[in-house]
Image: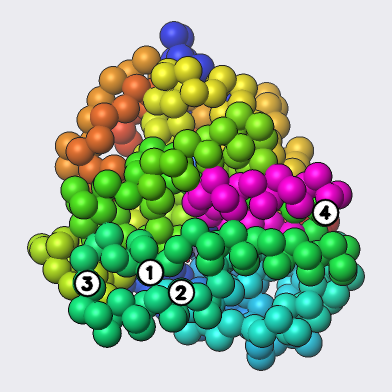
């Protein structure tokens, strides 16, 4: 298959190290096939799945199950994190051996049944993970602060979508970043901050880097694109953890995170839920009845290209954060994240000038496509996606086979 790339731009395949593919166990929301179909359509050649599935990916058998399901049905290449809870510290070496890309700790409650480890357990997990040479990433929100304000707001009868955002304040994120950086300074473990949503947290990451801690960080297109006004306009559709922040935090996220370089990676936190779970029929109904997260795989490249078009970052700075750095941070470089030609080539072809609007979320390829980007306009789109030399997506059609995608083996 030959792609006519004339007039378009060829970049190394986009690497999204933060998706919730939901398989095993939550296939009513999404599965490997539908998530990687969306990835192919979005220009994403490698995805890394989060471990808050059912069962959670907390032991080697569960990781193997997740890998087997991916081998059977993925359209693009993939990997997975293993979770560390208060109950599986001794399994860290086995999860490493079983081929986990890295580890994730959810500090505080999240979507799914993932008991958060206490501070002592986090420290011990860091010591054990240091021995594997792999990186430990955090859902970095202080659960005690979040739980306190959530309960208080519920008692006070505050139940608008914006109240959900304010119940998870910036201080909860910033404190968790500072604490885990302090722990990593003590243990010498490589750590990562997933989905950094605020300037305050980006600043804490910058200070950690300046201290010499091996801390890397990620943000998502939605924190760079929206302000909390989107919760007043689109309601619970835009509900996410951590929440979308105010304009001041967004500007400081741009300044400290992107302009000054505290943020290494762009990823989506692609988190599909059914329209019923999101409450789309009445997006301003009781926010506590709704659920956090939305899809992103097919809007991340257009959103970033739109920022490039507006002059907010260069195309090189975008590619570095959306392909090269994520592959390096998670140990997949140069197999992933580099510009190669030939049968090993992962390539994304984009039209940086295409102007379009996401009129209808049902044009997307996930099982459920609720997203606050519905109705947004972009400059730039994905034209074709090439995984290991094969075209998997071209001009509106996913043309690759389910099952072609394979696990990125980092222990070879
Ligand atoms: O909004 C979120 N949704 N944040 C998370 O940390 C989890 C995710 C999910 O799994 O739906
Ligand atoms: Zn998270
Ligand atoms: Zn997530």
Q: Which quadrant does the C terminus fall into?
A: bottom right
> What residue is rendered at 53% in x and 41% in y?
253
What is the C-alpha distance between the residues marked 1 and 3? 10 Å
Q: Which of marks 4 and 3 is in front?
A: 3
Say what secondary structure mark 1 lies in.
loop
* Mark linked to residue 213: 4
152 sits to left or right of 236: right
> Is the CB of the residue bearing disc 1 within 8 angstroms of ligand 1?
no
Earlier sequence position, callout 2 versus callout 1: 2
Tell me: residue 155, above or below residue 322: below
**Residue mark closest to the camera, 1 vs 4:** 1
Q: Residues within 10 Å of mark 4 (few under 14, many from 20)?
A: many
C-alpha distance separating marks 1 and 4? 30 Å
Helix, strand, or loop for circle 2?
helix
Give the residue number, with chain letter if any, for mark 2. Answer: 146
Of 359 and 291, nearer the camera is 291
* Magenta residue check for 197: yes
Q: Looking at the image, is mark 2 or mark 3 earlier in the sequence?
A: 2
The residue where tag 1 is placed is: 167
Q: What stretch is highlighted in magenta?
A: 191-212
Report whether 74 appears left or right of 152. right
Position in image of residue 283 (x %, y %): 16, 61
Q: Is mark 2 within 8 Å of ligand 1?
A: no
Q: In this view, does 400 lie above or below 191?
A: above
């Amino acid at each position: 298959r030959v792609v006519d790339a004339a007039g378009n731009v060829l970049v190394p395949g986009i690497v999204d190290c933060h998706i919730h593919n939901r398989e095993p166990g939550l296939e009513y929301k999404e599965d490997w096939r539908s998530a990687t179909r969306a990835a192919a359509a979005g220009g994403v050649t490698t995805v890394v799945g989060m471990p808050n599935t059912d069962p959670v990916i907390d032991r080697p058998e569960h990781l193997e199950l997740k890998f087997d399901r991916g081998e059977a049905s993925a359209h693009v290449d993939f990997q997975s994190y293993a979770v560390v809870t208060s109950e599986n510290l001794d399994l860290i070496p086995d999860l490493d051996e079983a081929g986990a890309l890295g580890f994730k700790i959810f500090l505080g409650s999240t979507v799914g049944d993932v008991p958060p480890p206490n501070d002592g357990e986090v420290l011990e997990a860091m010591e054990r993970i240091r021995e594997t040479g792999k990186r430990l990433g955090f859902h970095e929100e202080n659960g005690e602060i979040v739980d306190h304000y959530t309960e208080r707001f519920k008692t006070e009868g505050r139940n608008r979508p914006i109240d959900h955002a304010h119940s998870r304040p910036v201080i909860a994120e910033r404190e968790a970043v500072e604490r885990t950086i302090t722990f990593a300074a003590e243990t010498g473990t490589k750590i990562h901050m997933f989905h950094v949503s605020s300037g305050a947290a980006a600043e804490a990451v910058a200070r950690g880097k300046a201290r010499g801690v091996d801390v890397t960080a990620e943000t998502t297109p939605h924190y760079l694109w929206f302000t909390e006004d989107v919760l007043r306009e689109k309601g619970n559709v835009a509900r996410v953890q951590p929440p979308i922040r105010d304009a001041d935090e967004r500007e400081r996220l741009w300044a400290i995170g992107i302009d000054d370089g505290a943020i290494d990676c762009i990823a989506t936190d692609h988190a599909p839920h059914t329209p019923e779970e999101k409450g789309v029929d009445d997006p301003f109904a009781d926010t506590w009845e709704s659920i956090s997260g939305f899809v992103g795989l097919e809007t991340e490249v257009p959103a970033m290209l739109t920022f490039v078009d507006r002059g907010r970052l260069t195309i090189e700075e975008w590619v570095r954060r959306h392909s090269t750095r994520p592959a390096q941070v998670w140990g997949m470089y140069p197999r992933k994240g580099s510009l190669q030609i030939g049968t090993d080539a992962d390539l994304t072809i984009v039209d940086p000038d295409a102007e379009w609007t996401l009129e209808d979320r049902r044009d997307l390829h996930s099982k459920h496509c609720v997203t606050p980007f519905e109705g947004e306009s972009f400059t730039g789109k994905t034209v074709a996606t090439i995984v290991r030399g094969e075209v998997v997506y071209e001009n509106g059609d996913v043309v690759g086979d389910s099952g072609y995608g394979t696990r990125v083996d980092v222990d070879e």
